[in-house]
Structures are given as structure tokens and as C-alpha cells.
Image: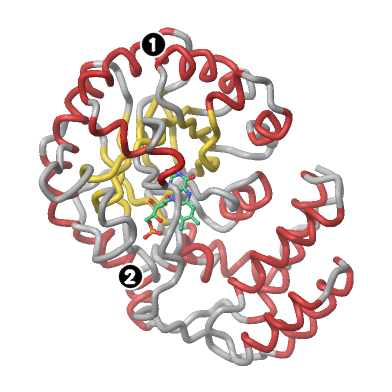
Amino acid sequence: MKNLRPFSEKLFQKIETFRKHATPLKLGAIHFDSRLILAPMAGICNIPYRLLMEDLGAGGTVSELISCHGINYGNERTLEMLKIHPLERNVGIQLFGEDPESMARAAEVAESFGPKFLDINMGCPVNKVVSKGGGSALMKEIESLAPLFEGMRARMKVPLSIKIRTGWDANSRNARDVIQVAQNAGIEWVAVHGRTRTQQYTGLADWDFLEALNDEKKLPLIGNGDLHHPYGVSERLKTTRCDALMIARGALRNPFIFLESLDPTYASQKRSIFLGEDYWEVVQRLRHYCEETFREERTILVQVRKLIVWFAAGFPHAAHFRGLVFATQNLDDCMKIAEDYFLSLGASQKFINYDEVFMSSGHG
Ligand SMILES: Cc1cc2nc3c(=O)[nH]c(=O)nc-3n(C[C@H](O)[C@H](O)[C@H](O)COP(=O)(O)O)c2cc1C
């Protein structure tokens, strides 16, 4: 990593204040630094974002879903997605597909890129994926799961995990049966998004169902769904019997969520010690990681723009900032706009309206 500028002493100290509250977690043979894991997100969980979230307290990360067929065809863009940075500590690669032989071949290739674990996407609700039998459609074909799991296991050495939903629809919430098959086939742990495929992103994640699943102790279980703010996450951490929690959308509007959730007293105050100046440091680090990862300035600009407008959510004049950022076609200009904005915020607090719908579609 070229010239990675350390965080300022001030930000470093703030981060350490929280980090010391983290409880380490062992899943299979893997030691995670915290029970809070970054969930896979398509178009988002690439090297720069994963590195950044590990810097900001995520105990582990998972790549976006990657097509087994793209890997087997040797598609250049797909193979790019498999890359891992040497600084990444606890990263898994998530594969999707439906055919056991294709998944097993792809697993072998994916493993050669050096992830700590591989994961199977069994929760994607998107038509393009389920119509071919992948994603959450795998949960409907329970008899096909043992050959899929065993075929992949036979070709790889790192742990294999699965990420599922509670079931296909309200009448077939068969997560319990899926987990039983997974346990028999040597899957190491399961992450469960507490909704059915039919629900997509509507309603609420069913945490009673997740806790009951966990109580069966078939496999270590990571609970996921609607953990959107530090207070909610810290409350869940206090009460859950799940081994770990997975956060997706919450980390987009608050990149400090993995840290702020660790101290319940702090989280209950619902005020943040992370201010505009801290966000500006985070944005600079994001740019650095993007420049290390992507060659084309246009790609870097697109990545940086997308994330920094989410990071600004809830701060004063965020909509104006968003307009300025999207009007610029040049990375240096974009960074200047970000610097002026985040440094002008002074002691302003973020106020996010969590009742408003935020991103109601995704691949899991
Ligand atoms: C934009 C977006 C992309 C997603 N991509 C994936 C993916 O590639 N693989 C996956 O298993 N889940 C994916 N998901 C689902 C999330 O991992 C998570 O299960 C879901 O968002 C619920 O968690 P949350 O309430 O913390 O957001 C995605 C979600 C979003 C919002």
C-alpha cells in the first residue's frame, strides 16, 4: 500500500475508544475482531469499501455476489471482482449460481485469490438470478443442496458458509431444514436475513424467528436485517443469542456504525462524537483505496461520489452537497467539494430519519 496516510491522532483515539469494547468472535477456524460483520452488497462491497469498513471496526467483510458462470468463462470483469487486497484481514468471497459442478469449479478458482472463506448466496430475490435457480431459489430445491454443498467442499480448503433468507414465502419458511442439510454437509456457519424472498425488503426482519433458529444450535448463526443505527445494533447485541450480527444498509449512511454500536451507554445517547472533520478523513482514505484498486479515474469518481453522498446523509444541507457532487465530472473537484462541505459542518450532528425507506432492493 503506497503512502497510506494514518488517521489523525484525534480520529485514531476516537476509534480506539470504541474498539476496546469489541468482543472477538471465532467462527470455524476464523478469528473475527468483532461480532459485527459487514454484509455483502452488490456494487458496494469491493476492495476499497471493505478495507475502509475494516479500518472502521467491521469484524469481517464479504464481497458482493459473484457469478460462478462468469468465473468459469474467465470473464475479465468477474475475475477482477475476485481480487483481494493484502491488507484485508477477514474477507470472504460470495458466489452465486445453481449448478453444483459450476459452483465447485468456481469455488476452486475463487479460493486461489486468497479469501479467508467462501460463501454461497442463497438469499438473492432478484428475478434474473432466481429464474435460473440461483439465489433464494436454492432454498426451494432442498434435495439439491447436499450435492451442491458437498461438491464445493470437496474442491476447497477454506471454510464454506451460506447466506439465506427465512424461506421462499410465508408458507415455506424452511430455513431450519436448509440449516440441517448445511450442517450435515460441513458448512461452517450461516447468515440469515430475517425476511422471506417474497417479502423482498418490505415489512420487518423477523428477529424472533432468527433467535429461535439460533437456539437449535445446528450451526453458528449470524443474524441480519434492519440493524440500521448504532442504538438498534447495541440493543440487539445486548439481547441476541446469535453468534454475530451482519449490517448492510446501516453502514452506508453511517460508516462508524460498527464502532458506535459497541458501547451501549454511548449508543443510547444517540449523539455522535464523529463529526464532519472525521468524515473528511474517511473520504480521503476512501479515495486512496479507490486509487490503489482502480486504474480509470472515471471508475474512481463513480465509487467515491456514490459513497460520499450516502456518508453525508443526515448532515445539514446534504441534499445541496449531493447536487454539487453529482454535477462534477472530475475527481479533484469532487474532493474539493467534499472537503469544503465536511469541514464546514463543525460540531453539527447527523440526524437521519430512520422511518423513511432507504434502499429497498438488493441481492440478498
Ligand atoms: C444494495 C444492496 C446490495 C446487496 N447485495 C447483496 C449481495 O450481493 N449478496 C447478498 O447476500 N446480499 C446482498 N444484499 C442483502 C444484504 O446483505 C442484507 O441481507 C440486507 O440488506 C438486509 O440487511 P440490512 O437491513 O442491514 O440492510 C444487498 C443489499 C443491498 C441493499
Of residues 281 and 334, which is closer to you in this image?
Answer: 334
On residue 151, the disc is: 1
Q: Element under label 2?
A: helix
Label 2, on which residue?
A: 264
Location of residue 189 with respect to 332 vertically, above or below: above
Location of residue 89 with respect to 251 vertically, above or below: above
Q: Position of residue 95 (x, y in %)?
A: 49, 30
Of residues 278 and 76, which is closer to you in this image?
Answer: 76
Q: Element under label 1?
A: helix
Residue at image x 29%, y 64%? 202
Which-is-in-front pick, marks 1 and 2? 1
On residue 36, the disc is: none
Circle 1 residues within 10 Å: few <14, some 14–19, many ≥20: some
Q: Amino acid at mark 1?
A: Gly
Q: Amino acid at mark 2?
A: Pro
Q: Position of residue 233 (x, y in %)?
A: 33, 64
Residue at image x 55%, y 65%? 255
Is the residue under label 2 in contact with that under label 1 (CB below 8 Å)? Answer: no
